[in-house]
Image (tube, rainbow, N blue to C red):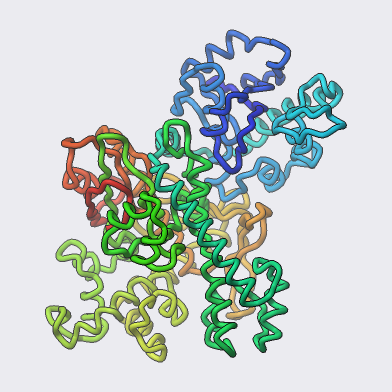
Amino acid sequence: MTILQIDIETFSSIDLADCGVHRYVEAPDFEILLFAFAFDNDPVQVIDLTDYQDIPRDVIDALRGDVVKTAWNAGFERTAIARQFGVDCLPQYWRCSMAHSYTLGLPGSLDKAAKALGFGEESQKDAKGKALIKYFSVPCKPTKVNGGRLRNYPHHDPERWQQYIDYNRQDVVVERAVRQKLERHPVPDREWRVWALDQKINDYGIGVDENLVRHAIACSQQYTERLLVEAKELTGVDNPNSLPQLKEWFADQGLPVESLNKDAMPELLDAAPNEETKRMLELRQEMGKTSVGKYDTMQLGTCDDGRVRGILQYCGASRTWRWAGRRVQMHNLPQNHLDDLVAARSVLASGDYELLEMLYGAPPFVLSELIRTALIPSPDNRFIVADFSAIEARVIAWLADEQWVLDVFQGHGKIYEATASRMFGIPMDTIVKGHENYKYRASGKVATLACGFGGGAAAMEKMDKKKEIAAEQYDPLVRQWREANPKIKRLWYRTEEAALEAVQTKGTVKLAHGVQYRYAGGVLFADLPSGHSLTYPSAEIKLDPKFSKDGLVFKAPDKTGRMVSQRTWGGTLVENLVQAIARDCLAENLLRLDEAGFAIPLHVHDEVILDVPMGIASVEEVTEIMGKEISWAPGLPLKAAGFECDFYQKD
């Protein structure tokens, strides 16, 4: 099979990181500067498009045909090439080495992945390369020295331009070497289908209510300016956004402050020595409502046709293969609790910010709740939103063969009530509103959400968001839940034993339902029933001093992309398995929905958002598709619920 490896260098006056590639290529001055390529193991060629060189005919034919094209972060190359050359870069004929790297638990940057794979310094990007990109590929500031120009062209520094050509050529050399090493552990064909669908979803994008976004930004700016004025008057501080200045002011008030992040606020508010200090803390809270910044991100990334694109990253959460958000970060949006979202949106869209505050309170909080609603269907369409019901609870019960839980999901589905009934030994039919036993439902719910992966009192406290349970009850409830779910508890230890045995014997150990642990070439694989595998690079067994027993250690990228050692245990391994299988259920149904002709602009966690013309299809049709048994997961009871809406929201 012929493979065409590609890397390009480009220019655009639009910021790529802030706006995304789909907006980036819409700039009037966007252009591909250098086009480096190689068929298979042929020498790398670089076409200098600024010098009026032509792309060779065989390359153009390959771009248009079914030859496999590959690149690091192939979505960038696909989008840019399609824009410049008018070539329909169908994703099914492309492969992405960055996505492949993610599937193996490696970093998403080329240089860090190369380092993790053992390549030398010559295979890694350096500061010199980044300087070349900054010089030729982004606008420059006009100065007297550069004659007031806004951009550097090759003739401004021919020697540096030659270095850029060499850099582009070396990128293909490195990308090819990295790809060939990654291919020792191939991505299954089914997953390349999922990746191709991911590209289709990102290309399609989702509509943005630009008027609402514009007013949200203006309202936020106006309110923030008002808060700054009040903060200055209250404290006398020149810059209330300055942490050192604020710390000094709080200390003068008798309140030592180490951090002003949201986790520290409750304790600081309780300790406030006077009303002025308390009010300043409240002002800081309101000014720090960072989720409002998502409106800015939406505005920056909205394309000329009013849609934001490229906000999902395939396998971005590489430990479980789940999708991650990019830029708008759809996976951590605030929920909406306002009684009438339509009215609140209408007031904001009218520009009457004073009325908005009078009706709904401080703008940051109402703006935060309206973020989801800024995403809208295509004209004459509506959204159908559907998600799996209690998907993780279903998967873990299936994996552990916890039959009573499976029976609940095959029947009435009231897992919180059923769990409470089993934990407390009370009839389930008494756990209803109006009965004194209804109070036990909260314990059943929190325990179900907190305890499945070995969580203890701390997990209970985190999940008890409404604080319906006394803190001293957390530990007893954990014990009761574990007694009610003995097979799930046993699964934690069976899973850890299987993983450790695979590493010790350098072999394969079967677990359950098609899951097995397999050690090969220094990597521990968790093979999943869907056909792909989770990876634990550099897996080894080391003494865990905390528990005085052997435990599993592996390497994973930290926030900077550097590979660092991590320790894990059975509960976390089970969490990885469950979340990965739940992700595979979503992927399977994305493929089904796409094959059924539904347009998918977005999916978030276990939820799909469909862009559907009026009068076509129904919620029931969608949930029926999502509730069908999956061939590789026989006996796993799936159920979905959904609703229709005119803008994105939580039901």
* Relative horizontal placement of residue 159, taking residue 423 as reference (left or right): right
Question: Image height check: is 288 above or below 330?
Answer: below
* Relative horizontal placement of residue 65, taking residue 423 as reference (left or right): right
**Coordinates of residue 242 in the picture (x, y in percent):** 69, 67
**Coordinates of residue 210 in the picture (x, y in percent):** 42, 42
Question: What quarter of the picture does the C terminus occupy?
Answer: bottom left
The one nearer the camera, 282 or 191, is: 282
Q: Residue at x 41, y 91 (%)?
A: 472
Q: Residue at x 71, y 21 (%)?
A: 44
Q: Residue at x 37, y 61 (%)?
A: 356
Q: Residue at x 45, y 39 (%)?
A: 308
The one nearer the camera, 380 or 226, is: 226
* Relative horizontal placement of residue 32, taking residue 303 as reference (left or right): right
Question: Image height check: is 467 above or below 543?
Answer: below
Specify the quadrant of the image occupied by residue 183. top right
Report if residue 281 is visible in the image. Answer: yes
